[in-house]
Amino acid sequence: MQISGEMIIGHRAVKGQGGDVFAIAAVSGEALEPAFGAASAHDIDQACELAESAFDTYRQLPDERRASFLDAIAQGLLDLGDNLTERAHLESGLPKPRLEGERMRTVTQLRLFATLLRDGRWHGAVLDSALPERAPLPRADLRQRRISVGPVAVFGSSNFPLAFSVAGGDTASALAAGSPVVVKAHNAHLGTSELVARVIQQAAKDTGMPEGVFSLVLGTGNDIGQALVSHPAIQAVGFTGSRQGGLALLRAAQARAVPIPVYAEMSSVNPVFLMPSALQARGPAIAKSFVDSLVLGAGQFCTNPGLLIAIEGEALEVFVKTAANELAARAPTTMLTPGIHGAYCQGLKRLRDSADVQPVAEGLAPKGLFEAQPAVFRTDAKAFLANPTLEDENFGPSSLLIVCRDFAEMRKVASRLAGQLTATLQLDQADHAQAAELLPTLERKAGRILFNDFPTGVEVSYAMVHGGPFPATADNRTTSVGAAAIERFLRPVCYQNVPDNLLPPSLTDANPLNLWRLRDGELVKG
Amino acid sequence: MQISGEMIIGHRAVKGQGGDVFAIAAVSGEALEPAFGAASAHDIDQACELAESAFDTYRQLPDERRASFLDAIAQGLLDLGDNLTERAHLESGLPKPRLEGERMRTVTQLRLFATLLRDGRWHGAVLDSALPERAPLPRADLRQRRISVGPVAVFGSSNFPLAFSVAGGDTASALAAGSPVVVKAHNAHLGTSELVARVIQQAAKDTGMPEGVFSLVLGTGNDIGQALVSHPAIQAVGFTGSRQGGLALLRAAQARAVPIPVYAEMSSVNPVFLMPSALQARGPAIAKSFVDSLVLGAGQFCTNPGLLIAIEGEALEVFVKTAANELAARAPTTMLTPGIHGAYCQGLKRLRDSADVQPVAEGLAPKGLFEAQPAVFRTDAKAFLANPTLEDENFGPSSLLIVCRDFAEMRKVASRLAGQLTATLQLDQADHAQAAELLPTLERKAGRILFNDFPTGVEVSYAMVHGGPFPATADNRTTSVGAAAIERFLRPVCYQNVPDNLLPPSLTDANPLNLWRLRDGELVKG
């Protein structure tokens, strides 16, 4: 499959007339061929209007039809073979095995949502029987199901060129919900985006989806994103990226005549609590696992362990020393973009220049232009509590150890943390009592709590929560990974006294979809 | 039970020092004794701090404990006897039988949420088994449940002094979710609010709830509401009232350092489509039911039928004539407050002064100071489509008939409507084909679709949706009436590799709460 530099707008491939944009080779920073054409306001409008015109048809398709569409996308991604990973590697600098893994993750996500559609639980069918004899007033027949909120705008992330980009989690969950999707390609991987968009376009044609169910637009600057989020046809937004970017979209969404929800996954430092007994018993082993998690993917994960919290003492010093030794042998790796690399280096400088912070470990010195040197710093709880900027995310393989005098101070640090995607405890049996004391606080701070594990590596499953209180996300009631992600794009509708022949199949008496339904307060298959 | 003019802040009754406020007799507009003391900033702070301090204890209580608390509130409301309805009648002008009905509705809501807690489905328990042998990577044990988002601020509505006020739907669903509640009393029923707040305070004491699980503050002006919504302890807001009021709270919530959701139920004109065959066959009967719905509670319902949409012709003229005759005999009734009455009269004037609008029916002339005269107006579709202000809600017993030339024009009107709480069709078998064409549009416009019924009278049940697209509400993904209202105040948390002894009971292997749980994608009781 060739990369042409075009956008995908409904059934067409369109060379944007808003000026040339080039993808950048991550290793060299050089422009990659071909030139891409940035979207004009008219292109954005077309993509959104097509999404709107496809909406009613698309959302009312039988579940099996939408499931087949998702399956066809998944198969198309597999069929792209090395074409996909080679271009993605060139654009992102991520190693091919990682990209192969990410492709499988993307395929898994699409198939999970296909399974969810076939299962049908997403309909949320609820039936309350009529009570014509009830006094003083009869009760009407009431039935509730969920439908899509409408077309969704998705912003591809820099750090997952496949799994959180054009055919990533937001797109898969929105398409499953019955929402047409307009993706704004991330400039860090324009060619990868086109390849994937063409797969979706072909899958839509092959499975007979209405035109406009999917479009891909591209361009630099903030105008395109603002125009997309402000378009009346768009009813929700999925975003993974910086806090600044997410908040800008949030403001645009709130300024609309009809405000819409923005699911922005923004920034998180993912605290890891090193509990005393675990540190004592197996500090060195934890240190090695920590370093593995820290440098994975050049630290470019939303769930990178950016904060360690521990109580002072000999065991902690052993941990620090082991981590330092371990990190000293780790090679630097190319970051996703020159911009991300520049921001990371600035973040390191800020930490190095901070009076209250000491460097304690670093990886091998960078050789390539845009390689990140992993680094660990330390500070004490008093300084951390006095300086809120120390909690700012430094996107990349950097982590800050906060040394507490005692457990009371550790609790205080926990209670002062901002919202997080994850919170992790390294602990042994003897730490359980303290863990039980920390848990209520951590539940309020994070969407996912891990014991004796590291937060990088987000499972695609039913129970996963990849979300959390602000500023980790803009909406802590949801997740962007896992089956529950579909709920972001659904709203309930109630039908009162509607006869069977006009009800949707999920709500008719015969229950032709064989759904679990809540009937008069009881879950029944019928 | 005496009314003292105090607020309820935790275990205490506090006379606010922010100046005297008086409740007003609806019929006369005269001040009622005693004087109430408005909250100071310190009072607001105290109520919110107490809510915060109660939160972790309260949310972790066994379901049965919170259910007993809700049951005790319900019983307390019953035990208030005539004291409650007499004061509520004085303050609101609503007839006592209506207030008795509303009390029972309030009790029903509290008991529904108690039932929901005992059922336990609200936990949303999801379990994914560990797959230690999976290649290339093992899967961790993952378990998800939902917890409360935190303390909630509730703004009592003017039109339901019991069911959407101090112990109303927002309070009941928030308390059920595990959220402490701080209520801002509506100035239209301060005495009623105090009586109910004292019941909740007593119930909290009797059932051993932590101090701060409930507080009631009061005061005039916007400052108190702004302070409440801006307080860092508050994590969500429930509001029923005007669009202006709802949007002001929304802006305050979005301006916070940590933005929070506002569930504002604001304005809706609840279109009723009179389909041709039904109009032909039983226009006069529909006209009578329409008038009943229009004047119910002086039209002071969010679901009042403020818009009729029909196709021109003889049958429609028969309908109009019957409605006019019917309305001509209806007595005016006192409105909730002088302010609401004034706004209603202005709305009538605006309609009467509009060149494109003709009056077609009105009720008996008012005698009392603050009585509303019911009225029906008509316009044509062309004028309606050209003048968006004709869709503005006129809160009270006023309705506007939009006459369409044909079904195509009716569809066009439907497609141009703003978001609504409800959309209603009066139809017969021969209208089904047209109804099927309208349904996809109506599903996008409204939270509830009714056939051959009228939207006033909102059932408290599992399938109810009292919500809808903006501006009907600020968040179309939820409902403020019915069992699903609890979901507004919940967020998911995932537990990765957490041992059984540290898991909440909803997620332990033994399933001691006997919950339906989603285990590896299958619903099971285990």
Image (spheres, coloured by chain):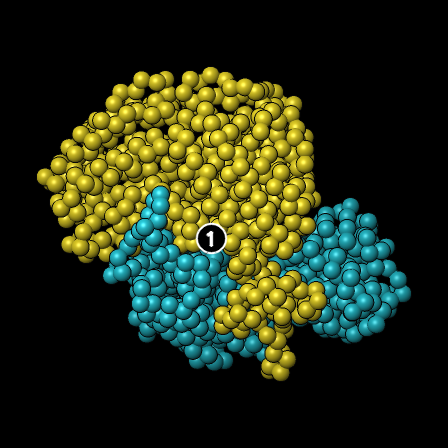
Chain colours: A yellow, B cyan
Residue B12 visible here: no
Pointer 1: what residue? A484
Q: Residues within 10 Å of mark 1 (few under 14, many from 20)?
A: many
Residue B317 position, x and y percent, is: 87, 65
Q: Nearer the viewer, residue B311 or B301?
A: B311
> Considering the numbered disc 1 on the image, is that residue within a helix, a strand or a loop?
helix
Residue occupying the point 35% across, 64% down: B506
Q: Quadrant of residue A3?
A: top right
Residue B346 position, x and y percent, is: 70, 55
Q: Which chain letter goes with mark 1?
A: A
Residue B181 position, x and y percent, is: 40, 60
Residue occupying the point 81% across, 53% down: B408
Is A371 placed left or right of B458 in the picture?
A: left
Residue occupying the point 47% across, 33% down: A161
The quadrant in which the C terminus of chain A is found is bottom right
Residue A121 position, x and y percent, is: 52, 60
Residue A283 visible here: yes
Q: What is the three-letter code of the residue carrying label 1?
A: Ala
Please tell me whether residue B307 is drawn above or below residue A302 in the rendered image.
Answer: below
